[in-house]
Image (cartoon, grey):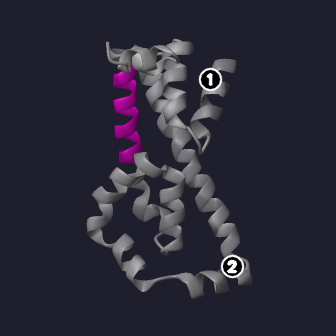
Amino acid sequence: MLQLVSFGLVAFSPVGGMVAAIPLGMLAFQMPTWQVWLLGVVSAYAQVVAVDLAWSGLERLQWWRRLLERQQSPRLRRLLSAPGAFWPTVVLVPIVGAWVVMGLMRYAGVPQRRVAVPILVGLALFATVLCAGCALVPEWFTPGEALAALAPR
């Protein structure tokens, strides 16, 4: 049980997140791949929910709304809320993090319900790649051995 809590907290972390949690779960804790994948995606998506709830709380404050109204760009709003933004959102999630993508979307005025699927797809694909990497080439994900494996011989 303590391992599940540790894994969930690492996966929920905005810095590191699934990149640290999936190797931790699969290689250190010897958890089943399906469990690591599922808990990794759910814990990482919890960041999105946390940012969305915090943003909704901030929107109740008058000074926050005034700040956003002055800063928002109509061009950014059109770009992020366009129907063709699905795949760029999927690609952006593993690169900058789900919580950053959600913050950017909320800043542009895009509600969570519009970006939930692309964020989940991005997290699922990223978790799949990490799980496959841990299963196929675990030496890349262990300290010390990773650098030795990449060093020229």
The magenta segment: 120-134
In the image, 45 versus 78, the foreground residue is 78
Dot label at residue 64: 2
Amino acid at the residue labelled 2 = Trp
Q: Is residue 29 above or below residue 74?
A: above
Q: Residue furthest left?
A: 84
How busy is the neighbourhood of tag 1: few (under 14 within 10 Å), some, or many (20 plus)?
some
In the image, 153 versus 77, the foreground residue is 153
Name the magenta segment's main secondary structure. Answer: helix
Q: Is residue 105 above or below residue 137?
A: below
Q: Is residue 9 left or right of residue 23?
A: right
Residue at 56%, 83% in the rendered image: 71
Q: Is residue 113 above or below residue 34?
A: below
Q: Could you say whether the residue bearing mark 2 is in a helix, strand or loop?
A: helix
Residue 1 seen in the current view? no
Of pointers 1 and 2, the one earlier in the residue sequence: 1
Q: Residue 92, how many percent across, how many down? A: 38, 54
Residue at 62%, 40% in the rendered image: 13
Q: Residue 102 magenta-drawn?
A: no
